[in-house]
Image (spheres, rainbow, N blue to C red):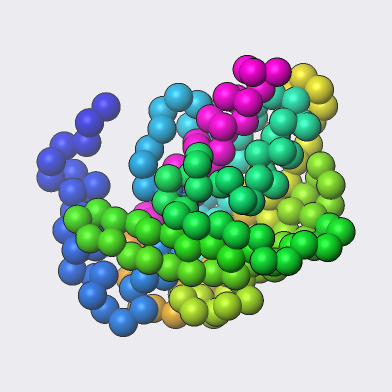
Amino acid sequence: MIAPAEGPAAVLRRTWGRAWRTPGAAWVAAVLLALAGDAAAAAPVVTVESRSGTYEVRGEFTTAAPLDTAWAVLTDYGDIASFVNSIKKSDVLKSGGDSLLVYQSAVVGVGFHFTARVTLSVTEDPKREIEFVDVLGEDFYRYAGTWSLSGDSSASVVKYSLLAIPRSNVPSWIGRSVMSHSVSDLLLQVHREIDRRAAKR
């Protein structure tokens, strides 16, 4: 369904067009999530809570793909740009055991473009959980979260959580909308890639 020209999406685009010029507005891009929607997979469940400039986001989806395939996609740090549209660069700077340091840059735009960079300290609990936290601190006071997995050889449940405290003064209603939309798109694109790889097995 296409949103009406003067619906919430149009209002949000106009507001972004004004807000992006404010100092620190580039935090929106730093969520490192895709703007391009993808209806191939079922819509994920996403919730956003905000208070005093802090955003807590949770999302999840279920796939018929086996746990091994889901884990392989979530840990494909070097190739994530090929299936998450907003990410333009993702390099593993350091890897040792279940710990990594990953540099990422992303571009997000709706009539304008933001570029954001994060350096994520990543800790893996194989086939169960991935924890990440930004140690660069350029666009966020705090940016940390987890991916968690449960399931077996016949199905997997993927859950995502994020705590973000941006450095900008974006109004909370814009922040909530951006977070909800962006995380939904991220999960849709990750879901699509998991299903694509599972179909090739």
Determine which quarter of the picture holds residue 2: top left
Please state the horizontal and vertical placement of residue 157, each as a whole percent of the image: 70, 34
Q: Residue at x 28, y 61 (%)?
A: 113
Relative to 33, is 158 on the left or the right?
right
Quarter location, residue 6: top left
| Left or right placement of residue 114 versus residue 123 in this view | left
Span of residues in magenta: 176-201
Q: In the image, 79: left or right of 3?
A: right
Q: Position of residue 38 (x, y in %)?
A: 41, 32
- Where residue 151 sits: x, y (%)? 79, 30
The quadrant of the image that shows the C terminus is: top right
Look at the picture and state if 8 lies above or below 49: above
* Residue 31 visible in the shown view: no
Q: Check the image and report above or below for 73 versus 135.
A: above
Does the image show residue 23?
yes
Principal secondary structure, stretch drawn in magenta:
helix
Classify residue 70 by image quadrant.
top right
